Image (tube, helix red, strand yellow):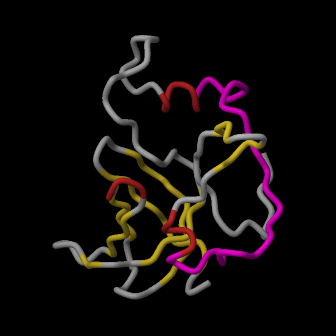
Amino acid sequence: MEISDKLLCLFSAEVRAEDDRYVVEVPRREVETGSIDAGDVYRVALISRRNATAKEREGANASGSGSPSSEPQPPVEIGELRYVEIEDIGKQGDGIARVERGYVIIVPGAEIGERVKVEISEVKSNFAVGEIIEDDF
């Protein structure tokens, strides 16, 4: 799948019915980090998880049992592009960003306060590693 350079943010969300319309909630962090502005109008693309590749489905079901896990799944996937703000520096000197539910993304070479575009290269149950692909967007 080709991803446009105009992509401002990427996240997973549920479509829910609300009165006479359907709603996709944008995570607060996307507005707070400056990726988007409340009140502005944006073009939205929805990508079905049903058509995910076998590798994507395997990553979404880390238990490997074929049945859904009761454990919360990481909010990122390998290859996913994310815009993050570095909030802290880890013990090894790597940048630390937090996304949904406080999930940590480790960003080698990043400094506190930097806003960077990263590609997720490794995903674990409690953290991910993201490689910088664009500095200070």
Look at the picture and state if 76 lies above or below 91: above
> Of helix, strand and loop, which mostly describes the magenta segment?
loop
Hey, which quadrant is residue 10 in on the image? bottom right
In this view of the protein, which residue sits in the foreground, 37 or 123? 37
Q: Hey, which residue is sitting farthest front in the picture? A: 19
Look at the picture and state if 71 lies above or below 107: above
x, y percent for residue 61:
45, 25
Residue drawn at x 33%, y 24% as measured from the top left = 70
The residue stretch that appears in magenta = 32-55
Hey, which quadrant is residue 18 in on the image? top right
Look at the picture and state if 117 lies above or below 19: below
Residue drawn at x 58%, y 32% as measured from the top left = 56
Q: Hey, which residue is sitting farthest left in the picture? A: 91
Look at the picture and state if 132 lies above or below 47: below
Quarter holding the N terminus is top right
x, y percent for residue 48:
72, 34
x, y percent for residue 35:
62, 75
In this view of the protein, which residue sits in the foreground, 26 or 89? 26
Q: Is residue 39 left or right of residue 93?
A: right
Residue drawn at x 35%, y 35% as measured from the top left = 72
Is residue 34 covered in magenta? yes
Residue drawn at x 62%, y 84% as measured from the top left = 137
